[in-house]
Image (cartoon, grey):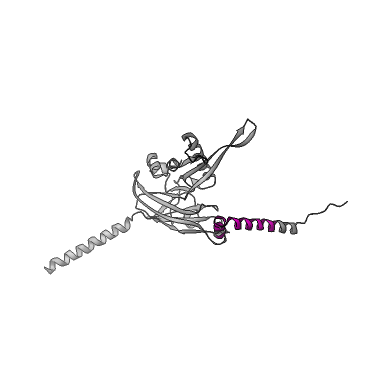
């Protein structure tokens, strides 16, 4: 009996070791972020957020980062009577993220069909994101007609693109892998829109502008093989005000009179300082 138990124990140990080796060689999709809290102070000039994790072999990665949803007031300019350039229409766009970036390890059209891109909200034209937004009449609170609503929503997206808050995927054919000589020597820049994959690990960077929207950001990552999403994972990070910026922001909401008096005092002090540094010269005769 003992002679039978010994080989059985050895076989069981071998099977467990093989299983652990298989799991180690083929990790599932994971996603992490650093820092998970971005502090916005007086000297905040933007920041690079590092997003990284593990990935199964022979798979591509698509990462979507969505910022907080904000209500934005917009106005449309036009000529009145063919002479005067003035506001001809106004709207409030709701339910639209103030930040939306998509990064991928390969050009997204090469790894995922357009219908799947739209379903996941990662298509270059942000179709899914735009379809969830709505433009309302600021006076009546009712939805604008579809044509007008689409015009305002698309206009807000274009403004966000110019501000660096929205951007489509980029071509990633020549992306150097993580840990390569090109990476070690600074061969590519952070925030290049590419997910760099190497040896079961992936990473990318998202550049937050100096006016990054405050609030919670969601990171959704998708593992794709043969045109199909086989795994997904998500995490979050937060952008928040700290120090004097936070104090002034709270004052503007909680005590508007004191905030207005403070701003007026600062303007007067700046004006007096400029007057002392650059005194007005009197003309001579």
Classify the position of the N terminus by image quarter.
Answer: bottom left
Percent from the top left, x then y, of residue 141? 49, 41
**Res. 265 image quadrant:** bottom right
Percent from the top left, x then y, of residue 137? 51, 39
In this orientation, which residue lies closer to the viewer: 256 or 239?
256
Residue 259 painted magenta: yes
**Res. 53 image quadrant:** bottom left
Residue 38 painted magenta: no
Q: Is residue 21 left or right of residue 255?
A: left
Q: Is residue 188 visible?
A: no
Percent from the top left, x then y, of residue 48? 50, 55
Q: Is residue 264 left or right of residue 39?
A: right
Q: Is residue 254 visible?
A: yes
Question: Most prominent secondary structure in the magenta stretch?
Answer: helix
Residue shown at the point (50%, 35%) measured from the top left = 148
Residue shown at the point (24%, 61%) measured from the top left = 16
In this orientation, which residue lies closer to the viewer: 235 or 243?
243
Percent from the top left, x then y, of residue 240? 50, 57
Residue shown at the point (13%, 66%) measured from the top left = 4
Q: Which residues are magenta?
A: 247-270
Q: Is residue 150 left or right of residue 114?
A: right
**Res. 266 image quadrant:** bottom right
């Amino acid at each position: 009996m003992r002679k039978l138990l010994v080989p059985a124990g050895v076989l069981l140990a071998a099977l467990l070791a093989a299983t652990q080796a298989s799991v180690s060689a083929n990790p599932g999709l994971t996603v992490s972020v650093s820092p998970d809290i971005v502090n916005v102070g007086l000297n905040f000039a933007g920041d690079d957020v590092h997003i990284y994790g593990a990935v199964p072999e022979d798979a591509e990665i698509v990462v979507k980062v969505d910022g907080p949803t904000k209500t934005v007031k917009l106005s449309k300019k036009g000529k009145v009577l063919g002479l005067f350039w003035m506001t001809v229409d106004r709207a409030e766009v709701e339910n639209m993220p103030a930040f939306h970036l998509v990064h991928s390890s390969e050009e997204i059209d090469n790894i995922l069909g357009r219908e799947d891109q739209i379903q996941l909200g990662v298509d270059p034209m942000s179709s899914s994101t735009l379809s969830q937004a709505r433009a309302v009449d600021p006076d009546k609170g009712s939805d604008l007609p579809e044509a007008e609503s689409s015009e305002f929503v698309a206009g807000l997206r274009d403004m966000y693109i110019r501000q660096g808050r929205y951007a489509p995927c980029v071509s990633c054919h020549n992306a150097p892998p993580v840990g390569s000589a090109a990476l070690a020597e600074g061969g590519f820049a952070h925030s290049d829109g590419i997910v760099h994959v190497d040896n079961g690990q992936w990473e990318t960077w998202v550049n937050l502008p100096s006016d990054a929207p405050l609030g919670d950001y969601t990171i959704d990552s998708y593992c794709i093989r043969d045109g199909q999403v086989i795994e997904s994972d998500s995490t979050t990070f937060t952008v928040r005000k700290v120090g004097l910026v936070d104090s002034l922001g709270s004052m503007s909401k909680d005590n508007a009179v004191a905030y207005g008096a403070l701003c007026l005092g600062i303007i007067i002090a700046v004006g007096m300082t400029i007057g002392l540094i650059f005194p007005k010269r009197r003309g001579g005769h």
